[in-house]
Image (cartoon, helix red, strand yellow):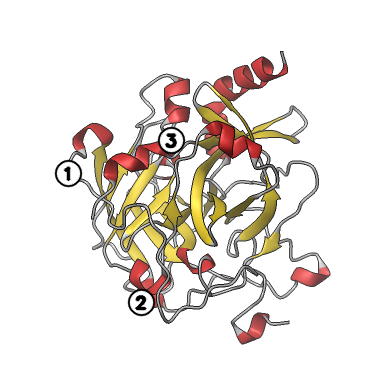
Amino acid sequence: MKSTIINKKAIALFIAACLGGITLNTWWNANAQTATSTEKAPKYTSLQDAKNFQIKGKGNAFQPSNLQQTDKPDQADDKQFRRRAVIGWDDRIPLLSRKYPWSAIGRVQGLTTEGKGYHCTGTLISEDIVLTNAHCVIDPETRQLSAKVAFLPNVINRKVADEEDIAQVENVVYGTDFSGTQLENQINDWALLKLNKPIGLKYGYLGWKSLPTATLTKNRNKYIFVGYSGDFPNNNKAQYQFFTAGQGWTASVEKGCSIVSEENNFLLHDCDTSGGSSGGPIIGVINNRPYIVALNNAEIKSRDGRGIINLGVKIDFLNRFEGN
C-alpha cells in the first residue's frame, strides 16, 4: 500500500517536482566570452534522431595523469578555503576539492527564451559530453527549449579553476520533450549535452554502470550524491561564512545514501536534494573507480514542504550511445 501511495504522488506531482528541481538565478557572466548575444542556441536532437550520436570511452571512468584522486571532497585545494528539502537530517558537506572525481562534476547554467537564468547539476561522462536531466534544458510545462546552456566545471564559491574552461553547449540529445505521459516523462528525464570544447581531458570524467535494481537496492547506505543545491551552503552558519557567493555556487556532497526501490521503471532514493541538484549523479564506487549508477531528477514533498522521497532515472539508456 505504501509504495502505491508514493507511486501515485510521484506521477501526479512530477512536473511540479521537476520545476522545483532547478533554481532560478542570473545568467553566468564571468567575462565577455561567456555570455554574449553572438552565442548560438544549442541544437536539440530527440533520441529517435540521434542514431549516429556516440559517447567516447565505452562507459569507463577517465582520470587525467596529472590530476590526483581523493575520496575527501571537503578537503580544499584553493588556499582561501582551507581551513533544502532534505530527507531526514542534512548530511551534506561542501565540495571544496579540485581533485578527481569531484573535478568532473559541475553546474549547468541555462537561459530561458524569456531571458531568465537558472541552474542544474551535470557530470562529464566523456571528453565533451555532460549528463543531466531533460528538464534542465526543456521546460516541462511549456516545452520551450532553453536559449543558452553552458557548463561550468567544478565550481567552488562561484569560481572555476580556469574561466577558459567554461564550455558552451552545442547540441542536446534528450530523452523526452515532455509531450508524453507523466510516467514516460519521468522515466526519460535525461539529456546529454555536447560541449564546444573537450574539457573532460583536463577535468576527467566519470564512467557509468547500468546495474540491476536488485543490486542497487541491496547496497544500502553506499552511494554518493553531488548537487548544486539552491539551499546550500547556508552561510548564516558559522562554518559556512566564507562562502561569499551564496547558495547554489558550491556543490554539496552526501555520502552514505541509498536507492530505496524501483516503481514503474523509475527509482526512489533518499539522498538529500533541493532545487538546483537536478541532474546530479548518484555515484557508486566499484573497484575503486567512481561510476554513475543513477541520475537524480525530482523530489516529492509533503503539504508542509518536507521531503518524502526523491526520484531517480535509470541510466541503461546510455548503453546505446557507447562509442570507441
Position of 4 compared to 160: left or right?
right
- Which mark lies nearer to you, 1 or 3? 1
Task: Answer whether residue 34 is visible to the viewer in this image.
Answer: no
Q: Which one is nearer the viewer's eye here, 203 or 44?
A: 203
Relative vertical location of residue 82 with respect to residue 310 in this rendering, above or below: below
Residue type beneath disc 2: Glu
Please name the residue shown 64% across and 46% down the image: 274
Please give the residue where the numbered disc 1 appears in the rendered image: 52
Specify the label residue 164 is tagged with. 2
Please name the residue shown 51% across and 58% down the image: 290
Please name the residue shown 49% across and 61% down the image: 105
**Mark 3 and mark 2: Cα distance apart in space:** 30 Å
**Mark 2 and mark 1: Cα distance apart in space:** 29 Å
Q: Earlier along the polypeptide chain: callout 2 or callout 1?
A: 1
Q: Which one is nearer the viewer's eye here, 23 or 306?
A: 306
Residue 179's quadrant in the figure? top left
Helix, strand or loop for disc 1: loop
Residue 37's quadrant in the figure? bottom left
Q: For mark 3, does the 10 Å Cα neighbourhood hold few (<14), some (14 to 19), or many (20 or more) residues? A: many
